Image (spheres, helix red, strand yellow):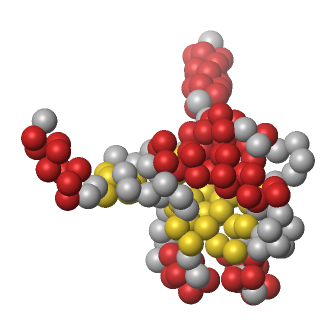
Amino acid sequence: MKTKLGLYSSALCLLLLVGCGNGDKTPVATLYGSTTINEAIDIKYSEFSSMMDDKMSFILTQYPENHCYCWSSFRDNVLYPYIEASHLITYQIGFSAFNVQGRNQYGIDAREDRPSVYVIEDGVVKYSAMYSGDSQIFHDYNAFKGWIEEFVYKPNIFYVTESELENLFKG
């Protein structure tokens, strides 16, 4: 009787522990935001690889440089308005900045014909999305906002200008 009770208790505990998992969709913590940035910060490959090697956590967009409508529409109607509203520091890098080794080394699926978004934690790509005609996060502001908020904790520390700081003290 005690053995059966012990087995049932163990099974129940195991079930509860397994049931608490969320499919490893733990949001990535971004450290800093900025009230003065309203678009993504353009970076070079050397800066990107340093950020990855330094095990930083950040948001990266990779964009095609062939002036495709998919990138300009996403950038102007979704990405930049979200950055301005959320103050989330986001980086962007063009396709030509990558060489094959860089894409393979860091897990970036850079394409010359479509944008992609990466959530990077401790120098490792944790979540990503690539543009396709039916990818709502590239077409709809609220869909992108929901996707980011599912995978990224908003920063609690913000870079501010001196005048913004003075206004805070003036009340």
Is residue 4 placed above or below 147 in the rendered structure? above
Quarter of image, res 127: bottom right
From this viewpoint, is residue 153 visible?
Answer: no
Is residue 102 placed above or below 73 in the rendered structure? below
Q: Quadrant of the C terminus?
A: top left
Q: Residue 156, percent across and down?
A: 34, 46
10 left or right of 70 in image: left
Q: Residue 134, percent across and down?
A: 88, 42
Q: Quadrant of the N terminus?
A: top right
- Seen from the viewer's position, the closer of residues 109 and 96 is 96
- Seen from the viewer's position, the closer of residues 115 and 164 is 164
- Identify which residue is drawn at 76% across, 43% down: 139
- Identify which residue is drawn at 62% across, 21% down: 12
- Identify which residue is drawn at 20% across, 58% down: 162
Q: Please identify the residue farthest to the top as the structure is shown.
A: 1
- Identify which residue is drawn at 70% across, 75% down: 94
76 left or right of 122 in image: right
Quarter of image, res 16: top right
Quarter of image, res 72: bottom right
Q: Residue 147, percent across and down?
A: 65, 41
Marker count (numbered): 0
- Seen from the viewer's position, the closer of residues 47 and 4 is 47
Q: Please identify the residue farthest to the right as the structure is shown.
A: 133
Q: Residue 81, percent across and down?
A: 57, 46
